[in-house]
Image: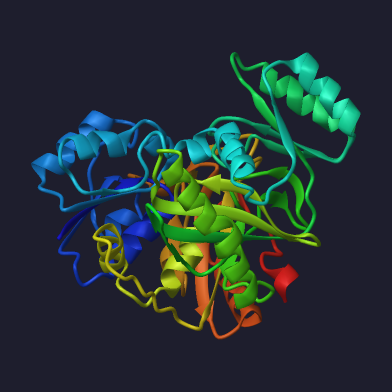
């Protein structure tokens, strides 16, 4: 089979890695891809926001299956465009992608179908939003409604922080915000392969959103993750599936927006049970980089079987995967481009490229999150030690990382 992976980040590198391991994959094409993906497939210079160009590429190259990585590409309607041309593609259409592209859309479905989540209200102007925040008090969560690349969320511990977040949000024309109660507990990510009402869980992972050690600082796209998560037992996973993931897939069918693709549940284990923090319409990043290396089943076969309404049973290694993101200095406020990176080829483990570029001088930074180093070991502590040892081999004057990824589960 010819397989096309759309995207250029770490998640897409992990998807390409999983496809390349499939016995069904004869040819792997990445659009536009990155220097890491170029080592395992052919990178074609078609941007992931060029829907017409992607359709043309798939038709000209006779692609058998396309897998979409980025949420922004899904929100542009790439799945709709591919289906119109009779091309097989795995991902939600534009309407179903609203589960991520509009937080208000997702919240309304959760409220209607009694899917556990934080209490909320949606606001379209600064004055009424600020009045509500003052009434509720802090801590409180401010979420900008649209796609924000894993950012756009402020957990405000004071009213002053909440006011600042609202000012930033409503400085954007036609923006709206979802304001939620602040939940407390243990976060985890449960991502499922979904086709209509068929929901197949993948192994759980835990992302670390805050930029600094100890979960301090602003939210990011994710600074590291690990899988599995000891604190999330099979009983907890069953509860999450039965009360959140399966009901959401079923609700979307009932609402006339059936979902096909990777349905991401950002969940929290609270004193009052499991609550939904958010849904995403694609694989998590950096969760993909630690979940997919643990998959022993054929990834492509699983997707094809799911789309053909055949049974899907997944097999996983017992090993623990642990990954740490190397990010640009001053991320998430800003990123760096053109800073030389050395030592990547010396790493004993997997290195997923998130924001890199190959130049005549060598590999350089080209984004906020730049690389992710992942190791697999028999237990989390060993994997933790191994990952941080390998990180030291990568040299770049403009990169930093958290030092505590996975500590809270040890």
- Is residue 16 shown above or below 277? below
Q: Is residue 191 left or right of residue 269?
A: left
Asked whether residue 285 appears in the rendered view, the answer is no
Is residue 332 or residue 111 the one in the foreground? 111
Residue 149: image location, x then y, percent: 54, 39
Q: Is residue 27 left or right of residue 235?
A: left
Q: Is residue 303 left or right of residue 101?
A: left
| Outermost residue, bottom side | 378
Is residue 352 or residue 270 the one in the foreground? 270
Residue 249: image location, x then y, percent: 47, 51
Q: Is residue 164 left or right of residue 323?
A: right
Residue 73: image location, x then y, percent: 37, 36
- Is residue 403 shown above or below 44? below
| Residue 111, quarter of picture | top right
- Is residue 327 shown above or below 257? below
Residue at 63%, 75% in the rendered image: 235
Residue at 44%, 49% in the rendered image: 282
Image quadrant containing the N terminus: bottom left
- Is residue 257 shown above or below 373? above
Residue 303: image location, x then y, percent: 30, 61
Image quadrant containing the C terminus: bottom right
């Amino acid at each position: 089979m010819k397989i096309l992976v759309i995207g250029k980040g770490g998640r897409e590198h992990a998807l390409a890695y999983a496809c390349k391991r499939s016995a069904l994959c004869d040819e792997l094409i990445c659009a536009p891809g990155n220097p890491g993906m170029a080592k395992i497939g052919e990178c074609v210079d078609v941007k992931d926001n060029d829907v017409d160009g992607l359709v043309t590429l798939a038709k000209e190259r006779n692609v058998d299956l396309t897998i979409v990585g980025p949420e922004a590409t899904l929100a542009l309607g790439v799945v709709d465009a591919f289906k119109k041309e009779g091309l097989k593609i795995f991902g939600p259409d534009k309407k179903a992608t609203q589960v991520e592209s509009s937080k208000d859309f997702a919240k309304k479905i959760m409220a209607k179908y009694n899917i556990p989540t934080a209490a909320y209200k949606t606001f379209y102007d600064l004055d009424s939003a600020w009045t509500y925040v003052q009434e509720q008090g802090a801590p409180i969560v401010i979420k900008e409604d649209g796609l924000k690349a894993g950012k756009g969320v402020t957990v405000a511990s004071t009213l002053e922080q909440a006011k600042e977040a609202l000012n930033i949000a409503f400085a954007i024309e036609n923006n709206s915000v979802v304001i939620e109660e602040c939940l407390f507990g243990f976060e985890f990510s449960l991502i499922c392969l979904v086709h209509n009402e068929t929901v197949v869980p993948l192994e759980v992972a835990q992302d670390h959103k805050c930029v600094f050690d100890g979960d301090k600082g602003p939210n990011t796209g994710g600074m590291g993750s690990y899988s599995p998560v000891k604190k999330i037992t099979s009983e907890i996973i069953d509860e999450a599936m039965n009360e959140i993931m399966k009901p959401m897939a079923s609700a979307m069918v009932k609402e006339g927006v059936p979902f096909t693709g990777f349905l991401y549940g950002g969940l929290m284990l609270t004193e009052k049970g499991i609550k939904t923090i958010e849904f995403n319409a694609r694989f998590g990043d950096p969760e993909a980089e630690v979940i997919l290396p643990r998959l022993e089943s054929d990834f492509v076969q699983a997707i094809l079987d799911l789309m053909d309404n055949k049974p899907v049973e997944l097999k996983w290694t017992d090993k623990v995967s642990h990954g740490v993101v190397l990010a640009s200095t001053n991320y998430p406020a800003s990123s760096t481009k053109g800073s030389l990176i050395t030592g990547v080829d010396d790493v004993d483990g997997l290195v997923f490229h998130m924001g890199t570029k190959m130049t005549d001088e060598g590999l350089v930074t080209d984004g906020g999150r730049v690389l992710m180093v992942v190791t697999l070991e028999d237990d989390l502590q060993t994997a933790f030690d191994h990952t941080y040892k390998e990180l030291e081999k990568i040299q770049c004057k403009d990169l930093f990382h958290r030092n505590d990824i996975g500590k809270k589960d040890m």
